[in-house]
Amino acid sequence: MCSAALAACDTGSAGAEADAAVDAAAPDAAPWIEPFDARAEGALLSVWGFGEGDVYAVGGQPEAGLAWRFDGAAWRKLALPEGALLNWVHGAGDTLFMVGNGGRVLRRVAGGAFEALDSGQGQALWGVFAVAPDDVWVVGGEAVGQTPALPVILHFDGTTWMPATLPAADRAYRAFFKVWASGPADVWAVGQAGVVMHYDGAAWRQVLVGTDQDLISLWGTGPDRLAVVGGRSHGVLARWDGTAWSTDVLASRTGVPSPGLNGVFMDPTGTLLTVGDRGHVLRVAPGAFEYIREETPTRVLLHGVWSTSAGHRVAVGGTLLDSPPWEGVLLDSRP
């Protein structure tokens, strides 16, 4: 059975067509390789870094979270407090945050030991974004099996976690999946049923982006350039240009829709990398809704992607559409 919370599930025929499509790989793309065998490590759900010599990937099994770090030469597993699956990672300044199932939050300051913080939540936390070490946003909620629905947005001021006051939405939804910010007064949260919320420094409000599909992840380069991805049977891309949203199914040059999308990264030029089912890594030009697929050595689901400023790209995922125990994958692409 597909996990509605963890991954975009491809149940239609577009996936088989996409695998068969003869779309040339981006000609200037460095090849993707597996720098180590992550199959025994559990699924990896998120990757992010402070820079080339300080990159983190997190994941694990439902009751056992883990994290890896790239130090510029090799990937090594980190020592963590015991706890549940870790779903996302981000940091600011000298402080790193990881969030996961059961309201789990880990913090590491200035390269020290990881400490567990009490978020005050028992629900899954799916996304984290640190504007600063004392200005951190976390989102989550149980996407299935809970009554009543309790989608959550939390703010951390360096000392205290406070739930955000959210407006009523125009549709039912149970969870937010990711959060991103260009600054303290420009924070975006996306989630189930196409729900998007924006914080302007004073209050949260719902924003309609033109889809009712689950929105799984987002990334941008500033207040006037943001991309959101999601979808289940087909990949959905929503773009914000600072004035208006444009939203469509992401398709190849031959018209083949992408599978559901889970992770996205935008580089300074506005070019997107987005990842999804069956090892799909897709490159999307600035402003476009057309992808070029890059070849990868895996056909398992990819969940997160990130790149350094020098173009060192990392994608992570695993067998999240299967029952646990999951097997993981980490892909590396260097110029």
Image (spheres, grey):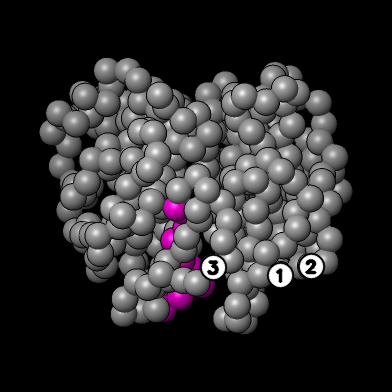
Determine which of the numbered discs, if any, sits on residue 80 in the image.
3
Residues at badges 1 and 2 in contact (C-beta under 8 Å)?
yes
Region in magenta: 49-60
- Report if residue 52 lies within the magenta region: yes
Give the residue number, with chain letter if any, for mark 2: 158
Instruction: Estimate the x, y position of residue 10 in percent, counting from the top left.
Output: 36, 25
Can residue 194 be seen here? The reply is: no
Determine which of the numbered discs, if any, sits on residue 100 in the image.
none
Give the alpha-carbon distance from disc 3 to disc 1, as whole Å. Answer: 20 Å
Q: Secondary structure at mark 2?
A: loop
Kindly identify the amino acid type of the residue bearing the numbered disc 1. Pro
Q: Secondary structure at mark 3?
A: loop
Nearer-N-terminus badge (1/2): 1
Give the residue number, with chain letter if any, for mark 1: 133
Can residue 5 be seen here? The reply is: yes
Query: 201 or 261: nearer the eye?
Result: 261
Quadrant for the N terminus, please: top left
